[in-house]
Image (spheres, rainbow, N blue to C red):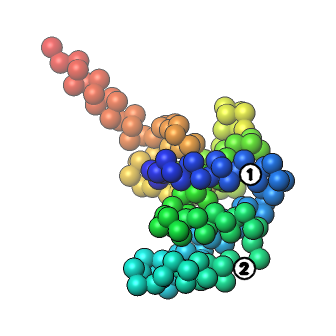
Amino acid sequence: MIRQLAAKRYAEAAYQLARERGTVEAWSTALDLMVAAFADPQMAAAMDSARLPAAAKLGLVERALEGIDPFALNLASLLVAKGRTALIPQIAEAFQERVDEELGVAHALAMTVVPLSDAEKEAISAKLEEITGKRIVLETQVDESIVGGLVVRIGDRLIDGSTKSQLLALKKQLQEARV
């Protein structure tokens, strides 16, 4: 997902505040609640409505997010006031990435033609942990277009061991070998 720079800035500021106050877990929970609350079609419609005054929007947000960390509620209120509630899912994602970075955790997506067994998942996770030096949280996906092999994405890094890419490389070599 392409993330707006503003979302990263909000997430970094939230992370720094949460870390200073020792409330990182509470912030994670609050951001998850914000994502759910603002994903609700009625809430989204209210936030997009030009007819609804800002004070009414803030009241809706305070009721929907009652009980969350007060500083997280301030973030939600700021985003409502600035008309930037659409950034909340991106902020939550960037915040979690920052938490994971601090904990030495990396998320990986492994794509294969057939579903992987638990033993295969463990072997892939172990190899990726060896390569990255981080604890891997592995998600798998079946993608028949890769023909065979394995494609792994860890953040911005792509490891393509698919049969499809090998065939394409061989095809290119054959085309370049013409005399």
- State the residue in front, 89 or 113: 89
- State the residue in front, 163 or 61: 61
- State the residue in front, 110 or 169: 110
Q: Earlier in the sequence, mark 2 or mark 1?
A: 1
The local crowd at label 2, few if under 14, some if 14 to 19, many if 20 or more residues have their Cα within 10 Å, is few
Location of residue 59 with respect to 133 vertically, above or below = below
Q: Residue at x 48, y 82 (%)?
A: 53
Q: Residue furthest top?
A: 179
Q: As shown in the figure, which amino acid type bears the numbered disc 2?
A: Glu
For label 2, the SS is loop
User: Can you give x and y, in whole percent of width and height, for residue 138 in the image?
Assistant: 65, 51
Q: Does residue 41 appear in the picture of this structure?
A: no
User: Can you give x and y, in whole percent of width and height, for residue 114 in the image?
Assistant: 52, 56
User: Can you give x and y, in whole percent of width and height, for residue 139 in the image?
Assistant: 61, 55
Q: Any mark on residue 8, and which? A: none
User: From mark 2 to mark 1, how far is it between C-alphas?
Assistant: 20 Å
Q: Is residue 79 left or right of residue 178?
A: right
Q: Which residue is mark 1?
A: 17
Occupied quadrant, residue 70: bottom right
Q: Any mark on residue 66, and which? A: 2
Location of residue 36 with respect to 95 vertically, above or below = below
Q: As shown in the figure, which amino acid type bears the numbered disc 1?
A: Leu
For label 1, the SS is helix
Q: Is residue 140 left or right of residue 16?
A: left
